[in-house]
Image: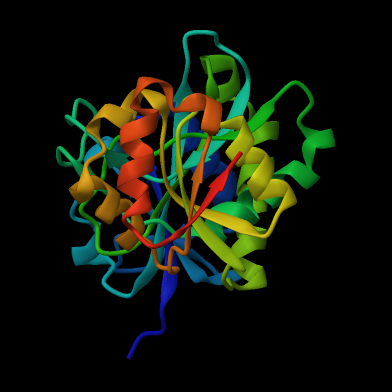
Amino acid sequence: MERRYYTIVASKEDVASMTMANYLINNRSFSRETNTNFLQSKHHQSIKLHVSDRSLLYLEDLDENYPDSIAFIFLSMHRSHKGVPTLTCHCTGNYGGNPYGGNPRELGIAYPYLQKQYLRTIVTLRALIPGYDVVIESSHHGPTSLKKPVLFIEIGSTESQWTDRNSSSVVCESILKVIDNGLGSCEKVAIGLGGTHYPMKFNKLLLESEYGLAAVAAKHNLESIDKNMLDQMIIKSVEKVTHVIVDWKGLGSEKTRIMELIGSTGLDIVRV
């Protein structure tokens, strides 16, 4: 029986994705073996690199090719209207419709420890990437139906960053280090509700406390949170969710309803 592995996923349609994939190929000896559809490196034998011709957002069939994968880590570009140089990471999911892949009202599976350790690792290398913000994002877009956890790690927000070999090397070395160190579990695991798409209060918790985060729903998603979506946020994590963290000032007009809803879960509620 083949031992389990992590699958790093890149797309030829994505400039930043291929900048990162090419770093792994050229600097970490990832190459394609005979009769395989993936690349591997003798230096990182617990990782397979999958390079797709399709958009990352629609790769809902990866389970078929990588049934023993522990997690899928997507190398992706990040876009924003402000164009701020940014390194981000996030889980996937659609609280409402699915304009960017995945299924409507479906969340992907989260791996809180993987996200926490990646964020912490890349922050230790901040000196190598001056000018970049390092943040998490709330859960959004596809794929959402994979049977294993998904983490997007992204470089943005314009082409000058997507083709930046230096930031690509930092991102790649960070995720390789996390995987090579071996994964564990967070002392406490929470879902997050409220705040902006870039939830800085939750970001601070990941860096400075014992908490890891599964799904995060920003303020603009809260009107879509009902019992079904809340149950998904709690259940779709490889680590058991024990807490709900709310951005108390970032719940908006949904505050009363959301607090009543999460009060019925029996989980510990933390206000930040």
Q: Is residue 164 left or right of residue 236?
A: right
Image quarter (top left, top right, bottom left or bottom right) of the C terminus: top right
125 vs 207, nearest the viewer: 207
Q: Residue at x 29, y 42 (%)?
A: 93
What residue lies at 44% left-to-right and 28% top-to-bottom? Answer: 251
Q: Say if residue 216 shows up in the picture.
A: yes
Q: Quadrant of residue 69?
A: bottom left
Report how many numbered discs are placed on residues in the image: 0
Q: Give residue 174's position: percent from left, percent from top.
A: 66, 51
Residue at the outermost bottom position: 1
Question: In this rendering, would 75 be left or right of 140?
Answer: right
Could you say which is closer to the camera, residue 45 or residue 179?
A: 179
Q: Residue furthest right?
A: 127
In the image, residue 163 lies at what x, y percent? 57, 24
Q: Position of residue 28 (x, y in %)?
A: 62, 56
Who's the residue at 33% across and 52% down the image?
Answer: 233
Quadrant of the image for the N terminus? bottom left
Q: Quadrant of residue 220?
A: top left
Residue at left 31%, top 55%?
Answer: 264
- Residue 252, compared with residue 191, is above or below; it is above
Tell me: 2 left or right of 210. left
Rendered location of residue 128, percent (x, y): 81, 35
